[in-house]
Image: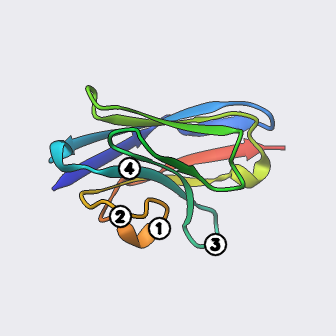
């Protein structure tokens, strides 16, 4: 089992920055990939960014490329999401996800472990 806890959400103005962090515990030695997804009110949960546990591969949604950066620290068992140049359309609950299997890292269905989510609100 893997437990995930997100932190770092909050309220920020358009153009501002936030840094989300996800702390993993449990079978962290078996994690092969981690990702961030988000869900806005009335919308489906969507992919934001992902990274393989060895850091060799990252993937970003087109909507956040050039603005968001995902990074992992294996020593601390954390994955962070640095979000810059935030827009009102980035407002959502952000979820951390992890999985013990390899393969495609941007598909929601490929993740078996999820955090409880953290709210990000970008005011215009």
Which of the marked residues, 1 or 4, is nearer the chain's N terminus?
Answer: 4
Q: Tell me the quadrant of the picture where the N terminus can be found.
A: bottom left
Give the distance between the C-alpha atoms of the residues marked 1 and 4, in whole angstroms: 11 Å
Give the distance between the C-alpha atoms of the residues marked 1 and 2, in whole angstroms: 8 Å
**Extreme front residue here?**
56
Q: What element carries label 3?
A: loop
Q: Is residue 70 left or right of residue 68?
A: left
Given contact means CB atoms under 8 Å apart, are the residues at marks 1 and 2 in contact? yes
Give the distance between the C-alpha atoms of the residues marked 2 and 3, in whole angstroms: 19 Å
Q: Residue 109: percent from the left, percent from the top?
A: 40, 72
Label 2 packing within 10 angstroms: few (<14), some (14-19), many (20+): some
> Which residue is at a point 54% across and 67% down the rendered structure image?
45
User: Front-most of 1 and 120?
Assistant: 1
Given contact means CB atoms under 8 Å apart, are the residues at marks 4 and 3 in contact? no
Query: Can residue 59 be seen in this snapshot?
Result: yes
**Extreme right residue here?**
124
Q: What element carries label 4?
A: strand
Q: Residue 14: percent from the left, percent from the top?
A: 80, 38
Which of the marked residues, 4 or 3, is nearer the chain's N terminus?
Answer: 4
Label 4 packing within 10 angstroms: few (<14), some (14-19), many (20+): many
Which of the marked residues, 2 or 4, is nearer the chain's N terminus?
Answer: 4
Identify the residue under disc 2. 111
Q: Is mark 1 on a helix, strand or loop?
A: loop
Label 1 packing within 10 angstroms: few (<14), some (14-19), many (20+): few
Identify the residue under disc 4. 34
Identify the residue under disc 1. 107
């Amino acid at each position: 089992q893997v437990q995930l806890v997100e932190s770092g959400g909050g309220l920020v103005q358009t153009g501002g920055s936030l840094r989300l962090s996800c702390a993993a515990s449990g079978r962290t030695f078996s994690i092969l990939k981690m990702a961030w997804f988000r869900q806005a009110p009335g919308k489906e949960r969507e992919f934001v960014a992902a990274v393989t546990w060895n850091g060799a591969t990252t993937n970003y949604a087109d909507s956040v490329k050039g603005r968001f950066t995902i990074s992992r620290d294996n020593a601390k068992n954390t994955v962070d999401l640095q979000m810059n140049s935030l827009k009102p359309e980035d407002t959502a609950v952000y979820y951390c996800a992890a999985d013990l299997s390899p393969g495609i890292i941007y598909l929601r269905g490929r993740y078996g472990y999820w955090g409880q989510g953290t709210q990000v609100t970008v005011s215009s």
